[in-house]
């Protein structure tokens, strides 16, 4: 079983929609991919900080489906970034740690599903970029907040993915871990589907529809955020979420209207260097596979 756990703000939604768009092709190869459209509804993965008896009861339909599939020789990919927490501190980051509660969450789920040697997969992102993108997500969700308040209690320059992976490796039911960088695989969801599902290159895949009611959670531009107070003043009948959508339609994120950057240029540069060093360290860790484009 392969468990894709995010991280947040690393194009997980688009990857999940690519799995969904290719469900028939994957099933023909003996692979069943289950994303949020199932794992947050009829095959619900519940909150994992409750008693094990309650988690096992909630996950019984998923466990039964996987037992039946394994009996037929099928393999499974479960994709849900909320397994390791939510897209805001202190769950996403606290102090010098990314996703401090992730090992306990993963351990609880694997125990409830009675799985051993699970294959974990997740995308990484420059920690400063992760925080900024997650902050923008709060505006999309209708929860505007000042950036300093959003990252209160987080030490951005101390965040390391290698520290998280080391903790995940201590989970008794985890086997190997596969990683990739969001920045390197941006726009290459098909390549990731092939890698995670173990498909040969000749298996035809397709991209998900551009529209069809699906939203890929593109964050607001700096110009849209700056115009938000004016939009809310001029349109007091709009909610914060709807006011932001109006501002984003006028100033969509683009080369002309880049996203917000509350960190100083020197801090961004230093973070990129630390991120590159951290990626090099991860490539030398045992039982860790680092995908390259």
Image (cartoon, grey):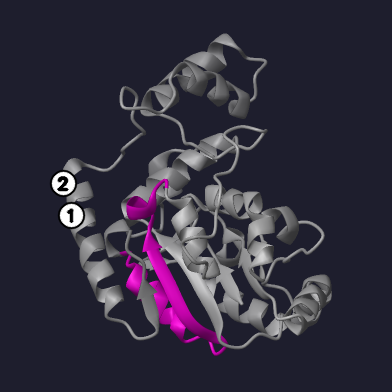
Q: Secondary structure at mark 2?
A: helix
Distance in Å between CA atoms under marks 2 and 1: 6 Å
Seen at 55% across and 52% down, the residue is 205
Q: Are marks 2 and 1 in contact (CB under 8 Å)?
A: yes
The answer to whether any part of residue 32 appears in the image is no
Residue occupied by mark 1: 270
| Up-down relation of residue 189 to residue 83 (above or below) | above
Residue 220 in picture, x, y percent from top left? 45, 31
Q: Residues within 10 Å of mark 2 (few under 14, many from 20)?
A: few
Residue 165 in picture, x, y percent from top left? 40, 75
Q: Nearer the viewer, residue 189 or 116?
A: 189
The span shown in magenta is 159-187
Q: Residues within 10 Å of mark 1 (few under 14, many from 20)?
A: few
Q: Nearer the viewer, residue 150 or 288?
A: 288
Q: Quadrant of the C terminus?
A: bottom left
Query: Is 166 inside the magenta-drawn segment?
Result: yes
For this view, does 9 lie left or right of residue 69?
A: left
Seen at 56% across and 9% down, the residue is 234
Q: How many marks?
A: 2
| Up-down relation of residue 3 to residue 240 (above or below) | below
Farthest residue to the front: give it: 202
The answer to whether any part of residue 141 appears in the image is yes
For this view, does 112 lie left or right of residue 61?
A: left
Farthest residue to the top: give it: 234
Residue occupied by mark 2: 266
Q: Secondary structure at mark 1?
A: helix
């Amino acid at each position: 079983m392969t468990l894709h756990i995010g991280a947040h703000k690393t194009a997980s939604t688009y990857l999940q929609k690519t799995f969904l768009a290719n469900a028939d092709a994957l099933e023909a190869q003996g692979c069943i991919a289950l994303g949020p459209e199932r794992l947050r509804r009829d095959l619900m993965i519940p909150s994992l900080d409750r008693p094990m008896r309650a988690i096992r009861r909630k996950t019984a339909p998923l466990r039964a489906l996987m037992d039946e599939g394994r009996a037929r020789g099928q393999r499974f990919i479960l994709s849900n970034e909320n397994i390791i927490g939510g897209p805001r501190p202190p769950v996403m980051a606290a102090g010098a740690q990314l996703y401090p509660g992730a090992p306990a969450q993963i351990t609880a789920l694997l125990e409830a599903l009675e799985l051993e040697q699970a294959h974990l997969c997740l995308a990484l992102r420059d920690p400063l970029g992760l925080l900024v993108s997650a902050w923008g997500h709060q505006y999309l969700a209708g929860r505007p907040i000042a950036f300093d308040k959003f990252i209160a209690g987080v030490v951005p320059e101390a965040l390391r993915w290698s520290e998280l992976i080391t903790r995940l490796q201590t989970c008794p039911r985890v086997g190997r871990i596969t990683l990739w960088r969001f920045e390197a695989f941006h726009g290459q969801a098909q390549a990731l589907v092939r890698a995670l599902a173990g498909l040969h290159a000749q298996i035809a895949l397709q991209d998900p529809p551009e529209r069809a009611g699906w939203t890929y959670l593109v964050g607001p531009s700096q110009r849209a955020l700056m115009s938000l107070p004016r939009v809310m003043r001029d349109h007091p009948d709009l909610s914060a979420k709807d006011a932001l959508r109006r501002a984003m339609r006028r100033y969509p994120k683009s080369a002309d209207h880049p996203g917000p950057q509350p960190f100083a240029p020197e801090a961004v540069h230093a973070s990129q260097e630390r991120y590159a060093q951290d990626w090099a360290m991860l490539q030398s860790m045992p039982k860790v596979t680092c995908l390259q484009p």
